[in-house]
Amino acid sequence: MRIREEAEEREFLIFSPYASFSSRSRGRERYEPPCDIRTVYQRDRDRILHSKSFRRLKHKTQVFLSPQGDHYRTRLTHTLEVSQLGRTIAKALRLNDDLVDAIALGHDLGHTPFGHSGERALNEVCPCGFAHYEQSVRVVELLEKKGEGLNLTWEVRDGILNHRTSGTPHTLEGKIVRYCDKIAYINHDIDDAERAGILKEEDIPLEFRQVMGYSTRERLNTLIHDVIRNSMGINDIVMSPHMETTMQELRKFMFANVYYNPVAKHEEGRAMGLLQTLYEYYEKHADEMPEEYLMLIEEKGEQKERVVCDYISGMTDQYSIQKFTELFVPKSWNV
């Protein structure tokens, strides 16, 4: 069968000359025979989708810690929204939407329990430091498959590492995910804040709504169109200067009124304390971590403090609470 080869050939007929062509990938750290059906980026997407780290995202905080409502975003639904926005832009610009999908699905695999508060907690106590975008790469290069990693292509790993605001992806597909991450979280966090009763649409400054729209739907439509319109036919992914400035100002508004809002973050200090207490415990009792983490220390020579972060950052919100309860909350006597 020549299914993969024919798919690769079609890319040269359909894609923009600025696209990342599957047959021209820089490849993987360890050589593998190519799949007879899937291109390299389709294969990477599948590996991420079937990973344990991806499944755990459904029980990790986006903004609101362990929300009780059914409709709040989690780290998983955020990831899916980034993927969908990215694929829309990639298809419109005739770029490699499979590469966009793989980067988007993998970009937050290294996120901690309790969102960015968990990231700050581990960064404060671990001498190695901690950043979720670096941890996401560590997940796919080492932690998945019991120390083997997923052996993803260079382009996917580069996009995952550089999805943060200050990142510099080396592919246009990576640049799309970098934009779509912000577009997604700003807008779905507005929606969740309205659902939580801490923000109303009318609270958003009028000058932002006049530029981007008067609802989440309108803002997403405006921002996606702006990226497509300004990136068409060039070797870059950009917004119009006015739109980008307005989006950054809206992001600042969200930090002031939602991300640092005491209603949304009233349990954040406790969550940080919980994770830091777990870190201190396992740093002293590393032998109580699961075997796959001990193997990283004993067989691969990984630093103990880093592996403790690996273990804790991989926990879901509820599992970290469960482990804390097991270790530090007195149990009733069974007499």
Image (cartoon, grey):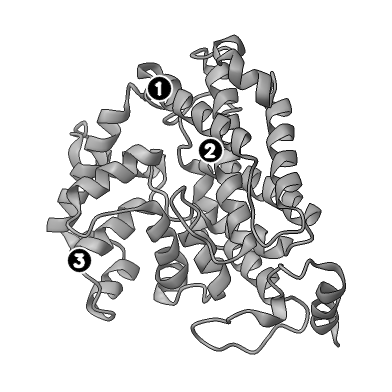
Residue contact between numbered discs 2 and 1, judged by CB atoms under 8 Å: no
Between 323 and 158, the residue placed more toward the observer is 158
Question: Label 3 belongs to which residue?
Answer: 304
Q: Position of residue 257 (x, y in %)?
A: 43, 19
Between 281 and 15, the residue placed more toward the observer is 15
Q: Position of residue 140 (x, y in %)?
A: 47, 67
Q: Give the residue type at disc 1.
A: Ala
Measured along the vertical axis of the image, is residue 207 above or below residue 268? above
Q: Give the residue type at disc 3.
A: Lys
Give the crowd class for mark 1: few <14, some 14-19, many >=20 residues within 10 Å: few
Measured along the vertical axis of the image, is residue 34 above or below residue 307? below
Give the crowd class for mark 2: few <14, some 14-19, many >=20 residues within 10 Å: many
Q: Nearer the viewer, mark 3 or mark 1?
A: 1
Residue under the point 75% across and 40% down: 225
Q: CA distance from mark 3 to mark 1?
A: 37 Å
Locate residue 236 relative to residue 228 in the image: left or right: left
Question: Label 2 belongs to which residue?
Answer: 74
Residue 256 marker: 1
